[in-house]
Image (cartoon, rainbow, N blue to C red):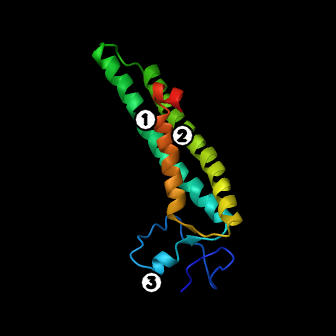
Amino acid sequence: MSVFISSSSIPIGYTTPEFPSIFWPIGPTRQSYLNSYLYYSWDIWRFTVYWSLILSGSLYFCVGSLAMLSSIINNYRHKIPIQSFKIITFIFVFLFYIFIGLLKGFIGGAIIGVILAAIYQAGSLTMSCWIPLTWSIAQILYDIASSYSISSIIL
């Protein structure tokens, strides 16, 4: 049993785990947990981008849904009739939110993925499949924290 797992000691017959590969480490002898390491830079980048797209897209989907729902409720409360033009506008704003969220997720995930891959390759370390997920969570938490007006001044 090796204490230090490095990227230069890739196991014989190693295959890249499938995308989520989030296994709970209930012991070092569990085969599914031992197979959930990333050794190659491309895999580190890819997992980080995938998680960033999923989480950022979901966040902006929720925000876009709330914005569209708020506009519809506001029109209903002020007794403004909803015309077909407004419905198209609501849908366009909703799709724009999702597009911006996916674009931001891809760019942020790509940058974070390159930096993570460089750090882990420079240290000759392997990466658990949990690390890209945690960095993607940190990315969307930063988006949420910086959405408040006072926190953008502090950050």
- The residue indicated by pointer 1 is 63
- The residue indicated by pointer 2 is 101
Query: Of marks 3 and 1, which one's residue comes earlier in the chain?
Result: 3
Residue visible at 46% across and 77% down in the picture: 32
Q: Are marks 1 and 2 in contact (CB under 8 Å)?
A: yes
Residue visible at 47% across and 33% down in the picture: 94
Crowd tier of the residue under label 2, counting other residues whose Cα lies within 10 Å: few below 14, some 14–19, many 20 or above: many
- The residue indicated by pointer 3 is 29
Crowd tier of the residue under label 1, counting other residues whose Cα lies within 10 Å: few below 14, some 14–19, many 20 or above: some
In front here: 148 or 13? Answer: 148
Q: CA distance from mark 3 to mark 1?
A: 42 Å
Residue visible at 41% across and 29% down in the picture: 67
In front here: 76 or 108? Answer: 108
What's under tag 2, amino acid-wise?
A: Gly
What's under tag 1, amino acid-wise?
A: Val
**Quadrant into which the C terminus falls:** top right
| Left or right relative to 16: residue 143 | left
- For the residue labelled by badge 2, is the local secondary structure a helix, a strand or a loop? helix
Query: Of marks 3 and 2, which one's residue comes earlier in the chain?
Result: 3
From the viewer's perspective, is residue 150 above or below residue 54? above
Residue 74 lies in what quarter of the image?
A: top left
What's under tag 3, amino acid-wise?
A: Thr
- For the residue labelled by badge 1, is the local secondary structure a helix, a strand or a loop? helix
Query: Of marks 1 and 2, which one's residue comes earlier in the chain?
Result: 1
Residue visible at 67% across and 66% down in the picture: 123
| Left or right relative to 8: residue 145 | left
- For the residue labelled by badge 3, is the local secondary structure a helix, a strand or a loop? loop
From the viewer's perspective, is residue 18 above or below residue 80? below
Report the disc number at residue 53: none
